Amino acid sequence: MTTTAFIGLGAMGFPMAAHLARQAQQQGGPALVWNRTPGKSEAHAAQYGTVGASLPEIAQADLLFTCLPTSAEVEEVMAQLTPHLKRGLIWVDCTSGHPDAARRQRTQLAERGVSFLDAPVSGGTGGAEAGTLTVMLGGPAGEVEAVRPHLAFAGKAVHVGDTGAGFAVKAINNVLLAVNLWAAGEGLAALARHDVNVSAALEVINASSGRSNASQNLIPQRVVTREFPCTFALGLLAKDCGIAVDVVNGVGGSAPLLAQTAALFRAAATAIGAGADHTAALKLIEQMNAQEIK
Ligand code: NDP
């Protein structure tokens, strides 16, 4: 019997933990949850039959998942858990974290007989609810294969390399999202100033070679509608872009477009607000052009 535990019942963690709980219940094992704000773990327990637990109880699980804003919060939680950790526990960190932190954390945990895998996810809150997330795993192949059957929230799980590789792939994926979003925003603001109807322009672009997830989904659903529903915070995307630049610099690479994009999203998070939806970055382009994208 495997005891599964989950820390961080946020926009992503809440539905991810629900999938893990369903699987654990089918297999007869308990599913423990912990959240900094206890009301969320109480709500999760009421909704999904999970068990709200203390951190020392969580540390006795076989399989521990975390989904926190950054590696800094994972480090904070790790400091609290460390004295209680059970030898043999496997820690699967689904945070979009930093590759350097992953290597450091794996080394620290190994001293206590605990494994650490970086396992960030992609697919948004919709993917988390549907259980169709893409997981990118970093760590030794044997440990990745041991964890794979337990990833109940995943539609796809790919072993991308050694410790830190999962976080590196995630950061590069997200800076590509930022590049596409920002570039489409600049182009559409110019077209709007040109008196072109933005929805008509999107219809053309989405049937042509300039299309992207930003032009096909994010901008029509969130920007043109002026809804900007906050499912993924702008501050978190700015953080991911910063990690991507660290990945480039860490290998002595040259990626001026990615560095520029990271700077733009940092500026947007400051000017518009880190807690706004990531698509609200385009409000900065709108200010720069005195033109709404709609
Ligand atoms: P949320 O802000 O919705 O949730 C963050 C969670 O972390 C909450 O449970 C929060 O607890 C907890 N937390 C924050 N600070 C601390 C702390 N110091 N100690 C303990 N717990 C803490 O974030 P998301 O769920 O959106 O994102 C989580 C991770 O997933 C991030 O790394 C993000 O980049 C990544 N991600 C997000 C996606 C999205 O679409 N939202 C998509 C893919 C990846 P509390 O309830 O008390 O605030």
Image: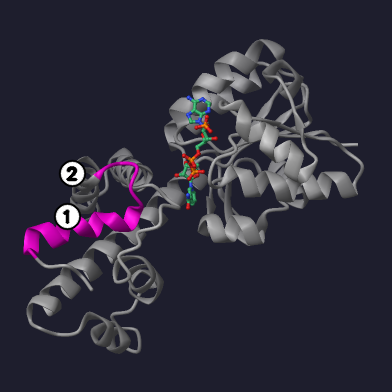
Where is residue 251? Give x, y as percent: 33, 42
Up/down of 88 relative to 181, above or below: above
285 magenta-colored: yes
N-terminal-most mark, 2 or 1:
2
Please give the residue where the numbered disc 1 appears in the rendered image.
284
Marks 2 and 1 in Cβ contact (< 8 Å): yes
Segment colored magenta: 273-290
Image quadrant occupied by the N terminus: top right
235 magenta-colored: no
Up/down of 45 relative to 261, above or below: above
Residue pictured at 88% horizontal, 38% vertical: 29
In front here: 97 or 113?
97
In front here: 206 or 225?
225
Residue pictured at 47% horizontal, 44% vertical: 167
Res 156 visible: no
Element type where label 1 sits in the image: helix
Residue type (three-letter) at the residue carrying disc 1: Leu
Callout 2: 10 Å neighbours few (<14), some, many (20+)?
few
